[in-house]
Amino acid sequence: MKLKTLIFILLLTLPLFKAIAQVRPLTYTELKKRISNPDTLYIVNFWATWCSPCVKELPNFDQLQRTYKDRPLKVLLVSMDIQSKLKTAVVPFVKSHKILASVYIASRNNDQELIDEIDKNWSGALPATLVVNAKKGVHRLYEKDFTYTELNAIYQTNK
């Protein structure tokens, strides 16, 4: 009887552990290393749980990752929520929206410092999407929300 109860509790809490493991802090140095493979196109979306246009476009990034799952494309979602919101806002959001892409929370001491490291021309507005293809010398930041069609066009242009 006790074993069945323990198994039941583990099965109920397993999705929570998966969601917590799915959202990890990420520094700029770690991001830079993560997007350095020259054989992969990286699409990095900077978003926040409180940003309506960000939330609206997130499924498009998941759809792009699913569509090209066997291609050298990696979609990364970097939450710009404050780090103290990781467990109370970001993890529940990721879990409830069933986000499949790799999700991180920006680990930074200073927002402006991180913004300047990502792209000196970035105003800091959200959503923002960074497209990187080291092999082709692509490093573009877009300060706008995207439809799936627009994301697909970016993939096709920069792959």
Image (cartoon, rainbow, N blue to C red):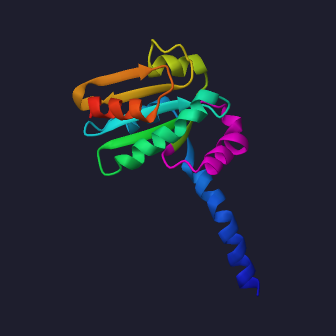
Instruction: Compare residues 155 and 10 and report the one nearer the observer.
Output: 155
Residue 79 location in percent, x, y? 58, 34
Residue in the foreground of this view, choosing between 8 and 66: 66
Q: Is residue 100 above or below residue 36?
A: below
Q: Is residue 107 visible?
A: no
**Side of 93 where 77 appears, left or right:** left
Q: Quadrant of the N terminus?
A: bottom right
Q: Range of the magenta residues?
A: 79-102
Q: Nearer the viewer, residue 51 or 40?
A: 51
Q: Position of residue 97 (x, y in %)?
A: 61, 47
Residue at (52% x, 41% y) in the render: 59
In the rendered image, the vertical position of residue 123 relative to residue 21, given as above or below: above
Quarter containing the C terminus: top left
User: Compared with residue 33, is residue 3 higher up or lower down, i.e. above or below?
Assistant: below
Given the current orientation, which residue lies at the most extreme left position?
135
Is 86 rendered above or below residue 95? above
User: Residue 130 location, x and y as percent?
Assistant: 42, 27
Magenta span includes 86: yes
126 left or right, relative to 86: left
Q: Is residue 103 magenta?
A: no
Q: Quadrant of residue 88?
A: top right
In the rendered image, which quarter is residue 39 located in? top left
- Give the residue displayed 57% in from the left and 23% down from the top: 126
Q: In the displayed structure, does residue 88 sit left or right of residue 62? A: right
At 65% from the left and 44% from the top, the residue drawn is: 93
Residue drawn 50% across the image and 21% down it: 144
